[in-house]
Image (tube, rainbow, N blue to C red):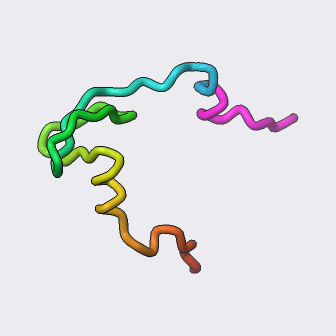
Amino acid sequence: MAYGNGGYRDRNRDQPREFFKATCSDCGQECEVPFKPTQGRPVYCRDCFRKHQPEDRGERRRF
C-alpha cells in the first residue's frame, strides 16, 4: 500500500482562505482574521498580536 502526502492541508490548498472582519481588542482598529471570532475571546490586529507573543517564540522546545 502506498502512502502519500494526502493530509488535510493538501485537500484545502486550492481553496481560498476565508477571512472574517473583527475589531482589535487592544487598539480598536478594524482588521481581518483567518478564523471566526468567538465572543468573550480577544482578537488582535497584526501589530497588537505581535506585542502579545512571548519573546522566546522562535526557540524550539527540547524534550
Query: In the image, residue 19 lies at what x, y percent?
Result: 37, 27
Residue at the extreme right of the image, as rendered? 1
Residue at the extreme bottom of the image, as rendered? 63
- Main secondary structure found in the magenta portion: loop
Q: In this picture, which residue range is highlighted in magenta? A: 1-11
* Figure label count: 0
> What residue is at 56 percent from the left and 19 percent from the top?
15
User: For this rendering, which residue is in front, 47 or 53?
Assistant: 47
Residue 4 vertical position relative to residue 54 in the rendered view, above or below: above
Q: Is residue 19 left or right of residue 61?
A: left
> What residue is at 20 percent from the left and 39 percent from the top?
29
> What residue is at 60 percent from the left and 33 percent from the top?
8
Query: In the image, residue 48 lies at what x, y percent?
Result: 28, 53
Q: Is residue 48 left or right of residue 17?
A: left
Residue 52 vertical position relative to residue 27 in the rendered view, above or below: below
Picture quadrant of residue 34: top left
Q: Is residue 10 left or right of residue 54?
A: right
Picture quadrant of residue 3: top right
Residue 58 vertical position relative to residue 30 in the rendered view, above or below: below
Residue 17 vertical position relative to residue 46 in the rendered view, above or below: above
Query: In the image, residue 4 lies at what x, y percent?
Result: 80, 36
Magenta segment includes 3? yes
> What residue is at 48 percent from the left and 26 percent from the top?
17
User: For this rendering, which residue is in front, 16 or 39?
Assistant: 16
Q: Is residue 4 left or right of residue 39?
A: right
Q: Quadrant of the C terminus?
A: bottom right
User: For this rendering, which residue is in front, 36 or 45?
Assistant: 45
Magenta segment includes 56? no
Q: Quadrant of the N terminus?
A: top right
Query: In the image, residue 52 lies at what x, y percent?
Result: 29, 62
